[in-house]
Image (tube, helix red, strand yellow):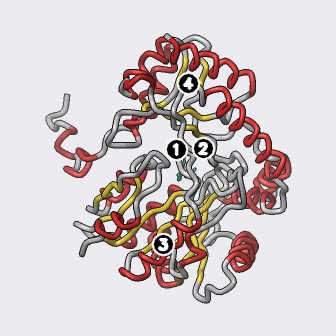
Amino acid sequence: MGGNDPERWIAARMGKFESSGIRKVFDLARQLKDPVNLSIGQPDFPVPAPCRQAAIRAIEAGHNSYTVTQGLASLRDKLGRQVAARFPSHSDRKLLVTSGTSGALVLALMTVLDPGDEVLACDPWFVMYPNLPLLAGGIMKALPTGPDFMPDPDQVEREIGPRTKALIINSPANPTGAIMPASLMERLARLCAKRGVLLISDEIYSLFSFDGPHRSPAEFNEQALVIDGFSKTYAMTGWRVGYIHGPSRLIEEMTKLQQYTFVCAPSMAQHGALEALDLDMSPIVSDYGRKRDYMRERLEKYYDIGPPGGAFYIYPKAPSGMKGSDFVAKAIANNLLIIPGNVFSASDTHFRLSYAVADRELERGADLLIKLARD
Ligand SMILES: Cc1ncc(COP(=O)(O)O)c(C=O)c1O
């Protein structure tokens, strides 16, 4: 054996990252036989055929090299036209194609955070929000939320301090499925503008808004950074295409950083994504809305399920005062895979289920959850 312990090469920073609690559930899943799996955060429909064919054509036609860092001009133009139609009054909005929404989040946070800076985000949060700021020596400060999973804007204002650089809003949200009312978006967006805080809106679930059109806090804040992607909308989680748009100065800095990190989003996936923008996804949205209604109807008598307005998650409270993690252990012992809420929260009170699965699986899941609530 060589003399150096690899431990000595690991940066102190790495001690702050914990391996994802979701991965731990996946590891457990491997030991179960034919489990009902409501733990997965990705769509269950196939990538639309025109996108698959376009990606294959791109490979065969030799589009296998780097693209420009900003992303294919054709894709940027098409996305840019959509963005301009959505935010017609925003005069300084530039767009960058990224390696998934995750890539956009990394670039955004690395671009704006100095060591010691803070980012505000709601508890429950998406797992990347507390972890990514650590890369830049920053930290996420959690905003408590009520039973509707919404923060109190007065409390948000009190939390803003001299080191607060950004506020992340994620609506529809992972893990709660909650959609922020436009009036609250407006208050928070205006608060950010007033206090010089950058608003970052993660809109990856924008398509999955079941009870009305998707609203963006950027409607009320011209300088907001908006992040979106193709992973959830077109079931392309493995293709790694997302995009970010916002003030040109910030996008220029992110583009510079992308040159030295991700380089570009995968070329063939960008060609596939270009086709996606012409597709009508409304049949998928209504089907997922139907799945949401089914789970809500079956579970609401037994669980406090909050308001699951979108994405494809429900975030129920564990029954009879049980800890979320104890309830999940019990569910897994009964062959049902769900995610404990303490992966997404400082509280261990809830669990996340995903209804992006086949109807038969949902039925089995609902049966098991009802049985567990009655036990
Ligand atoms: C809220 C949220 N943001 C970002 C992402 C990252 O998505 P991707 O990097 O696949 O675009 C996810 C994935 O689960 C998510 O739930």
Q: What residue sits right under mark 4 in the picture?
A: 302
- First in sequence: mark 1 vs mark 2: 1
Q: Position of residue 145 (x, y in %)?
A: 40, 51
- First in sequence: mark 1 vs mark 4: 1
Residue at disc 1, CB closer than 8 Å to ligand 1? no
Displayed quadrant of residue 242: bottom right
> Mark 3: which secondary structure?
helix
Q: What residue sits right under mark 2 in the picture?
A: 308
- First in sequence: mark 3 vs mark 2: 3
Q: Are marks 1 and 2 in contact (CB under 8 Å)?
A: yes
Question: Could you give the CA–CA distance between mark 1 and mark 4, rounded to whole angstroms?
Answer: 17 Å
- First in sequence: mark 1 vs mark 3: 1
Residue at 16% from the left image edge and 38% from the top image edge = 4
> Mark 4: which secondary structure?
loop
Depth check: give the residue in front, 11 or 48. 48
* Front position among marks 1 and 4: 4
Q: Which mark is residue 187?
A: 3
Other residues around mark 3 within 10 Å, as few (<14) / some (14–19) / many (≥20)? some
Q: Quadrant of the N terminus?
A: top left
Q: Are marks 1 and 4 in contact (CB under 8 Å)?
A: no
Q: Which mark is residue 176?
A: 1
